[in-house]
Amino acid sequence: MDNSIGSLLSIRLRFSDDARLGPGKIALLEAVERTGSVAAAGQSLGMSERRALLLIESLTAFFGEPVVLIDPHSGEARVSALGSELVRAFRAVEADARRSLDTQFAAVRAKMSAHRDHSS
C-alpha cells in the first residue's frame, strides 16, 4: 500500500457548474485509447456504453471539439488530439500535486505512520 499523502489525492476540475473533469473522465479517455472502443472502455470501467458516450459528449460540448473520434463505419474509437492533451495535462497536474503534497505533508505522514504503528 502506498503510504504517501499524495496517494490520497483526487483532483476534480470544475470549468463551470456543468463542465467538470476528474479521474473518471480521464480514465474513460485512457480506456478508449487502450481498447479502441467506447463500449469496451465503458465496460472496463463498469459503466454502460450510453453513460460513456454521455461523458464523452459532455466534454466535446464544453470544449467545442471532439475528445474522441468514432469511425462511423467500423465504430472504432480513438482519442483526439484534444482528448490526449486533456489526459496529459490532467495527469501532469495530478503528479505535480502529489509531489507537492508529499513534500508539504512530510511531517504529517511521519505522524500518521507513528499513529498506525501504535494502534496496531
Image (cartoon, grey):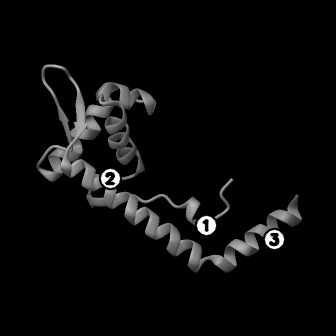
Residue 59 is situated, as x and y percent measured from the top left of the image, at: 22, 46
Which label's residue is closer to the chain start, 1 or 2? Answer: 1
Q: Which mark is residue 87?
A: 2
Under circle 2, the secondary element is helix
How many dots with numbers? 3
Residue that label 3 marks: 114
Name the residue rendered at 81%, 71% in the picture.
114
Q: Secondary structure at mark 3?
A: helix
Q: Which dot, 2 or 3, sits closer to the camera? A: 2
The residue sitting at 68% across, 80% down in the picture is 107
Q: Nearer the viewer, mark 1 or mark 2?
A: 2
Give the CA separation, mark 1 to mark 2: 22 Å
Residue drawn at (65%, 57%) of the image: 2
Report whether 91 appears left or right of 1. Answer: left
Mark 3 belongs to which amino acid? Ala
Q: CA distance from mark 1 to mark 3?
A: 14 Å
**Compared with residue 14, is residue 37 higher up or lower down, i.e. above or below?**
above
Q: In this orientation, which residue lies closer to the viewer: 91 or 117?
A: 91
Question: Residue 37: x and y, percent?
Answer: 30, 28
* Contact check, label 1 and label 2, Cβ < 8 Å: no
Residue 65 has which mark? Answer: none
32 is higher (above) or lower (below) than 48: below
Residue tagged by mark 1?
5
